[in-house]
């Protein structure tokens, strides 16, 4: 469990398994188109090579057989591909619950520059860059961003979904066995993009319950200062090296996620983060205020 699984062709959950079946089905169908081209191209090139003695027959005549093959084959294949695409798109709708027994685990996900916050609203806890959940039970995710658009993806469990400020996306996943799986942001969002990764841990039911109890009692209490620190542009490693903020929190408000999302009818403006960062870089607010009133800032401040 020390090396996260990342191979999407070795799925660990229901959604990824269905995606693998769909992938190989598409490969097989496309092989009917690409295969003859790969085989016939070198054969034709050899047969009609410059030094060869093959008969040159430039006179062609209309043939219903060839017309039917040239047009009918692609039409049939495209029709079959369209059917499978429609079937899998509707069956694996990320907003729809999975056909899996068990009580779902609800987790709210917030994307930052450059880390992920996972909120467990039913337990009052949250973690940074670590998604912990029980094996064999549905995992219901709600996603948003408190910065620019991001893309949430755990390859061995399922497909990716975008997270945007002021909006809520959903994703339903599940793991078939205990394990450690790698997840990341696949949407470029700045110089820390390549390090915005997280670990998804699927635990046995008893181990998950023990983890909930431990986090609820021993993690650092949540506060506005913690929230502001997380919202700063930094990776989890940079943040923990700078101070003792930690990566797990208790006493998390039940309305934290809805407060981050804000009114659903507002216009998301990620530039507000840039303005806030610019104001921080500009210096103390009291110096700015003195300048605005026509007084020179105190050099001693």
Image (tube, rainbow, N blue to C red):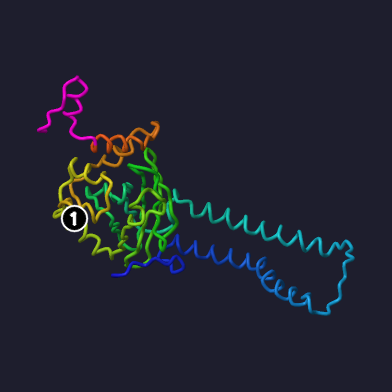
Q: Judge the density around disc 1: few (<14), some (14-19), many (≥20) Cα neighbours within 10 Å.
A: few
Residue 207: within the magenta? Answer: no
Q: Position of residue 249 (x, y in %)?
A: 19, 50
**Residue 43 higher or lower than 267, as above or below:** below
Is residue 293 located in the magenta-colored stretch of the structure? yes
Looking at the image, residue 13 lies above or below residue 280: below
Q: Locate residue 298 relative to residue 64 in the image: left or right.
A: left
Mark 1: secondary structure: helix
Residue at point 77% right, 77% down?
47
Tell which of 62 and 127 is nearer to you: 62
Give the quadrant of the N terminus. Answer: bottom left
Residue 65 lies in quadrant: bottom right
Which quadrant of the rendered structure holds the C terminus?
top left
Tell me the residue at 42%/67% (across/down). Answer: 7
Name the one closer to the observer, 287 or 162: 287
Task: Say above or below: 252 vs 19.
Answer: above
Residue depicted at x 32% and y 54%: 105
For label 1, the residue is 241
- At which x and y percent is residue 49? 77, 76
Residue 5: where, in percent of width, then height?
Answer: 37, 67
Camera-side residue: 23 or 276?
Answer: 276
Relative to 84, is 283 above or below?
above
Looking at the picture, how far across and down is residue 38, in whole percent? Answer: 66, 71
* Res 165 quadrant in image: top left
Which residue is situated farthest in the left direction here? 300
Which residues are the magenta region? 282-301
Q: Report the side of 100 relative to 231 (left or right).
A: right
């Amino acid at each position: 469990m020390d090396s996260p699984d990342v191979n999407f062709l070795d799925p660990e959950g229901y959604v990824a398994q269905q995606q693998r079946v769909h992938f190989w089905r598409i490969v097989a169908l496309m092989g009917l188109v690409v295969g003859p081209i790969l085989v016939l191209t070198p054969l034709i090139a050899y047969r009609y090579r410059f030094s060869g003695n093959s008969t040159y027959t430039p006179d062609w005549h209309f043939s219903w057989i060839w017309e039917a093959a040239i047009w009918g084959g692609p039409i049939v294949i495209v029709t079959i591909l369209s059917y499978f695409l429609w079937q899998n798109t509707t069956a694996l709708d990320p907003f729809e619950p999975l056909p899996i027994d068990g009580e779902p685990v609800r987790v709210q996900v917030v994307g930052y520059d450059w880390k992920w916050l996972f909120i467990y609203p039913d337990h009052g806890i949250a973690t940074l860059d670590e998604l912990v959940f029980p094996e064999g039970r549905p995992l219901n995710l709600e996603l948003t961003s408190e910065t620019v658009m991001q893309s949430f993806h755990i390859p061995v469990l399922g497909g990716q979904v975008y997270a945007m400020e002021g909006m809520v996306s959903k994703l339903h996943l599940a793991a078939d066995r205990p394990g450690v799986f790698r997840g990341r942001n696949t949407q470029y969002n700045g110089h820390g993009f390549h390090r915005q990764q997280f670990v998804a841990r699927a635990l046995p039911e008893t181990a998950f319950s023990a983890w909930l109890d431990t986090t609820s009692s021993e993690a650092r209490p949540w506060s506005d200062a913690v929230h502001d620190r997380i919202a700063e542009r930094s990776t989890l490693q940079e943040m923990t090296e700078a101070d003792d903020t930690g990566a797990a929190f208790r006493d998390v408000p039940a309305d934290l996620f809805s407060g981050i999302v804000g009114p659903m009818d507002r216009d998301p403006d990620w530039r507000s983060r840039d303005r806030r960062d610019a104001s921080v870089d500009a210096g103390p607010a009291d110096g700015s205020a003195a300048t605005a009133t026509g007084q020179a800032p105190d050099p001693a401040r």
